[in-house]
Amino acid sequence: MNTESTKSIQNNVASGDSERVPFFKMFKIFLGLGLTSFGGPVAHLGYLQNEFVERRKWLTPSAYADLVALCQFLPGPSSSQVGFSIGLGKGGFRGGLAAWLGFTLPSAILMIAFAYGVTIFSEVLHSGWLRGLMVAAVAVVAQAVWGMATKLCPDRNRATLALAAALAVLIFPTTFTQVLVIISGGVAGYALYHQKESPLAVDHHSIYKGSGRVYLILFFVLLAGLPLASALSHSHVLSVLDGFYRAGSLVFGGGHVVLPLLQATVVPTGWLSSEAFLAGYGAAQAVPGPLFTFAAYLGAALEPAPNGWLGGLSALAAIFLPALLLVLGVLPFWDTLRVKPAAQSALLGTNAAVVGILLAALYDPVWLKGIHAPTDFMIGLGAFGLLQFWKTPSWLVVALCAGVSFLSG
């Protein structure tokens, strides 16, 4: 990525500390998140909000909500795309790469290891500490919703938009509904606030879009070219890469939505049995980080070769590549759009809609999967207090929840 394009992304990061973060420091920060971010994509957004909005002040709540709204529109794992964008903003392309590696590698390594020893690791899925990790996710998401609602829904209109968005997503729980809710929030925001001075503070700056166009062209070339190359060459390796790249390119919402595409890619072809697929899916629920790392397990377990570590890493790179190319391609244009007064007014509504979507997700699936007994509620309440009022680091809260749940269960 060239200097001008990187600078345009950095201006989206509202922080008093404009110093660029070195590669290894960025990697270390996101590695901590990658080791402790349990609970699925919605919980991951809570962990990122807690780390970079509340603790480090790298982003304002509005800028963070803007990124979440944008990544909800793009195919791929939205929480990974948000993290990659934050890394870009504070460290350029190297920072984005460090952020993605730190957040992704822990779960990818665990999933590849699981492929090597399914029988040995399957007992871990039934351990008592897993329940504590899900309870911790409830507290993290609750804190994120609390903090974002306080800052992004300060008036009656935006609070109403957030509640309406939550109701719509709960009544019609589809990815399409989430996209429609964000669009509707933008329309409502424009209608309610376009005649008022927007409170969003966005710097005006020159933006180079050439590199963005290159990344977008590369995304579509690979999407169309990989299946053609696979068909012409009859290469099993290209077929595998095409299947995982296509899954990462065509799924909106990320997380569990990608599972049917992956199943259709590896089971009917005979590359993996249904039993092995379901075993890996169960393991994916027990590891931190993005659910897309399930692809690392699949790549490692596939027959015939390439499999093992090489197959796992290849599948991992193929499924994440389209999401990262789209972020690199779209961000420069998004940076131009968001400085326009009409867009700023619309963003007030989309930010409120994002709060509503997170509020709905706090109930389903986070609450429904995490709270099953009064003990779970008490642990979750204590975790929320530690996060919100005592400002305890997320990783420590996660460890405490796992330990308390294990001892109490």
Image (cartoon, grey):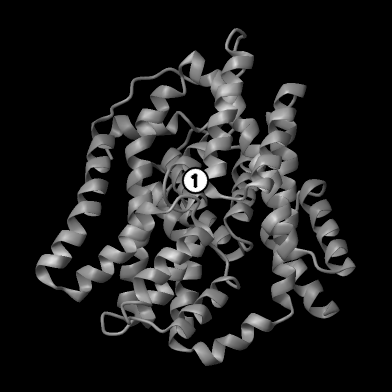
Q: Callout 1: helix, strand or loop?
A: helix
Image height of 258 relative to 20, above or below: below
For the residue carrying disc 1, how many other residues have a C-alpha within 10 Å: few (<14), some (14-19), or many (20+)?
Answer: many
Do we see residue 149 in this rendering? Answer: yes
Task: Give x and y (percent) for residue 88.
Answer: 41, 42
Do we see residue 201 in this rendering? Answer: no
Image height of 127 relative to 5, above or below: below
Viewer-side residue, 172 vs 366: 172
- Residue at image coords 20%, 61%: 227
- Residue at image coords 25%, 35%: 213
Task: Give x and y (percent) for residue 72.
Answer: 50, 43
Q: Quadrant of the N terminus?
A: top left
**Disc 1: which residue:** 82
Task: Give x and y (percent) for residue 396.
Answer: 71, 62
Q: Residue 210 falls in which quadrant of the image?
A: top left
Task: Give x and y (percent) for residue 245.
Answer: 31, 60
Residue furthest to the left: 232
Q: Residue 158 falls in which quadrant of the image?
A: top right
- Residue at image coords 33%, 52%: 322
- Residue at image coords 61%, 26%: 349
The answer to whether residue 280 is left or right of residue 302 is: right
The answer to whether residue 307 is left or right of residue 371 is: left
Give the amino acid type for the residue marked by disc 1 in the picture: Val
Q: Quadrant of the C terminus?
A: bottom right
Viewer-side residue, 26 vs 306: 306
